[in-house]
């Protein structure tokens, strides 16, 4: 297999040196970064596939907005999110992966080689790994971006540990909000659930578990109107607004967890690949295979269940190995 791979790479590189239209053609293009994109890059680069990675608008993905990560294996004292992503990127570069700080705006998967565009520049590839992730829905308040990782979080599993014996607010009304609220009671002294309506949309059983929990207090018809704090001080309090009366009150709080859903970054793929009603890429169960041969998905762009750094990295490995085998079988 190793001999076959070297011969395959030699043929493609020979075509590139001919100076024809194959100049920008790649064995594999990886769209997106973060743990899934970078792990895909590490594995495909080590397989001598010379991957080209488009990092997108948020190089390094969602983990670059996280401060300390304590649940990624191999770092007993934890590691800062941006540092972990930089380390993964440099590891991939060491094996020959190439990176561009650009976004793919359009693709054409109707023919092979596949065509992709970053702005006006066209690229082509024999295979594509999509690792564009999903973006957490935010409240859109003015200083929200400055406070993410400094009192504002979108991941209870990731950050709950940092709120031992502290008071926090969960924003949301669905099952995810109820689950995260209950999970956070393991750490926090008090958990408030803020919901803009006077009833939850969560399933009855999840509502009952949250409502009856001794550490949880429900704030119906309430929204966060303002975060109080800066990048330097972190979150210190919030201003809560009653959606019925308009009354605003201050509340000292240690943390806000936003649980109003995620949006997969797949808008540019519409009409090119099968995605579900929520925008997630549909893959063959247990595999990174999409409905287009030669196009694979990795990480939060198709994972609606776990959404963790370590699982995203695992999906990246899975996609890379599958891509390598697919290329060898489809010269």
Image (spheres, grey):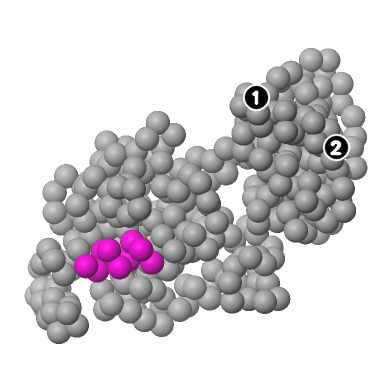
Q: Main secondary structure of the magenta part?
A: helix
Residue 53 in percent (x, y) is at 37, 65
* Quarter containing the C terminus: bottom left
Instruction: Residue under label 2, please give it.
Output: 214
* Quarter containing the N terminus: bottom left
Q: Secondary structure at mark 2?
A: loop
Answer with the quarter of the image where residue 91 lies: bottom left
The range drawn in magenta is: 317-325
Sequence order check, earlier mark of 1 and 2? 1
Does the CB distance between marks 1 and 2 fall below 8 Å? no
Which residue is pictured at 34% across the width and 48% down the height?
A: 285
Which residue is pictured at 30% across the width and 68% down the height?
A: 321
Residue 191 in percent (x, y) is at 81, 41
Which residue is pictured at 53% across the width and 76% down the height?
A: 87
Residue 23 in percent (x, y) is at 18, 68
In the picture, the disc for residue 204 is 1
- In the image, taking residue 154 as reference, residue 184 lies left or right, namely right
Name the residue nearer the viewer: 70 or 273. Answer: 70
């Amino acid at each position: 297999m190793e001999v076959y791979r070297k011969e395959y790479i030699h043929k493609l590189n020979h075509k590139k040196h001919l100076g024809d239209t194959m100049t920008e053609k790649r064995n594999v293009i990886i769209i997106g970064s973060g743990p899934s994109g970078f792990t895909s890059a590490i594995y495909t680069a080590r397989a001598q596939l010379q991957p080209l990675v488009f990092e997108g608008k948020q190089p390094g993905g969602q983990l670059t907005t996280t401060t300390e990560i304590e649940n990624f294996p191999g770092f007993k004292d934890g590691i800062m999110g941006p540092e972990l992503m930089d380390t993964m990127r440099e590891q991939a570069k060491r094996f020959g992966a190439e990176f561009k700080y650009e976004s793919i705006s359009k693709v054409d998967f109707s023919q092979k080689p596949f065509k992709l565009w970053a702005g006006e520049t066209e690229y082509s590839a024999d295979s594509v790994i999509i690792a564009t992730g999903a973006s957490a829905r935010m409240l859109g308040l003015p200083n929200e971006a400055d406070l993410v990782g400094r009192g504002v979080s979108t991941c209870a599993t990731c950050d709950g540990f940092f709120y031992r014996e502290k008071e926090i607010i969960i924003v949301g009304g669905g099952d995810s909000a109820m689950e995260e609220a209950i999970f956070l009671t393991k750490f926090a002294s008090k958990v408030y659930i803020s919901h803009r309506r006077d009833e939850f949309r969560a399933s009855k059983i999840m509502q009952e578990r949250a409502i009856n929990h001794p550490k949880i207090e429900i704030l119906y018809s309430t929204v966060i109107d303002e975060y109080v704090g800066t990048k330097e001080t972190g979150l210190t309090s919030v201003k809560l607004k009653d959606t019925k009366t308009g009354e605003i009150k201050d509340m000292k709080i240690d943390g806000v967890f936003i649980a109003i859903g995620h949006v997969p970054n797949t808008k540019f793929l519409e009409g090119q690949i099968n995605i579900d009603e929520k925008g997630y890429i549909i893959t063959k169960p247990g595999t990174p295979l999409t409905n287009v041969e030669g196009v694979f998905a990795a990480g939060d762009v198709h994972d609606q269940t776990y959404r963790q750094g370590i699982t995203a990295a695992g999906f990246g490995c899975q996609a890379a190995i599958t891509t390598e085998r697919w290329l060898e079988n489809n010269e």
